[in-house]
Amino acid sequence: EIVMTQSPATLSVSPGERATLSCRASHSVSSNLAWYQQKPGQAPRLLIYAASTRATGIPVRFSGSGSGTEFTLIISSLQSEDFAVYYCQQYNNWPPWTFGQGTKVEIK
Amino acid sequence: QVQLVQFGAEVKKPGSSVKVSCKASGGTFSSYAISWVRQAPGQGLEWLGGIIPVFGTTNYAEKFQGRVTITADKSTRTVYMELSSLRSQDTAIYYCARSVLETYYFDHWGQGTLVTVSS
C-alpha cells in the first residue's frame, strides 16, 4: 500500500498570500496524483489531477507540480473561499487508492 | 450534468449491517466506476472499495475484505455499499465518488450519508 504524507498539518496564511502544500508518497506514483479541497459540511471537490492539470472550473490560482514521490499544491493568492482542508490522493498503485491525512489552510 | 445522490442518515447497533445507496444521473453509466470513501468525525478520507457497474467487477481495500460488499443495479443506475459487523469505529460519513474508466481520480462526489453506530 502506498502511504501518502502531507505537510504541514495546518497552514496559517493571510488572505492574498501564497500557500504551499506538500505531499509525499512512500513509493513512486509517477504523475498519478490528485488534489481535493474539502470545506466543512461538504464533500471533497477535485482540484487537480495528473499532478498538474486543473479540473473543470478550478481557478488558475491553484497549481500543482511534481512527479514520483514529491508533489506540491500552490495557491498563489488566497481568497476567503480557499480556507479549507486539502487532500492529496494517489491512483497509480491500487487497490487501495490512498489519501494523505490532509492539510488545513486557516486564516492567519 | 453528472450527479451522485445519496439519501439520509442511518443509525445502527453494533454487530448489525448497513446498506447505503448512491444514484447516478447524467453521464454515461457504462463508462465509469463508483467508489466508496468514508470519513470518520474529524478525520481524513479512507477508500473502502469500488465497482465498475457495466461489468460488475469490484475491488475492495484489504482492511474491509469480508465486511464490505458493493453492488450495482444498472437498470436504476444505483450503486450500493453494504458494511457488516458494524462497530463504533465505523461511525462516519460514507461518500460515493465517480471515476471515469482509465483515470481513477474522483471527479464527482455524492453529498455523503452519515452512518452512526451506537448501542
Image (cartoon, coloured by chain):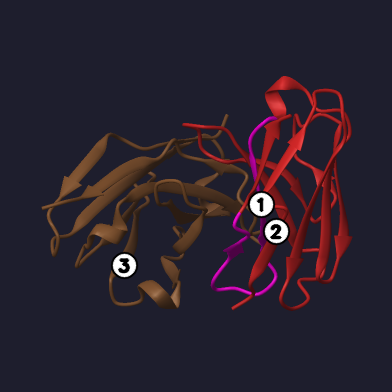
> Vertically, is A18 above or below B53?
above
Is residue A99 magenta-colored?
Answer: yes
Picture mark count: 3
Q: Is residue A67 left or right of residue B6?
A: right
Amino acid on which the number 3 mark rests in the picture: Val
Gap in angstroms between the C-alphas marked 3 and 2 = 28 Å
Residue B107 drawn at (x, y percent): 62, 44
Residue nearest the viewer, comparing A75 with B4:
A75
> Vertically, is B8 above or below A3?
above
Secondary structure found at label 2: strand
Residue A6, labelled with which disc?
2
Name the residue located 46 percent from the left edge and 59 percent from the top edge.
Answer: B54
Name the residue located 72 percent from the left edge and 21 percent from the top edge.
Answer: A80
Disc 3 target residue: B68
Gap in angstroms between the C-alphas marked 1 and 2 = 7 Å
Q: Which residues are magenta?
A: A83-101
Amino acid on which the number 2 mark rests in the picture: Gln
Disc 1 target residue: A9
Residue nearest the viewer, comparing A2 with A19:
A19
Nearer the observer, disc 1 or disc 2? 1
Q: Are marks 3 and 2 on the same chain?
A: no
Residue A67 drawn at (x, y percent): 86, 65
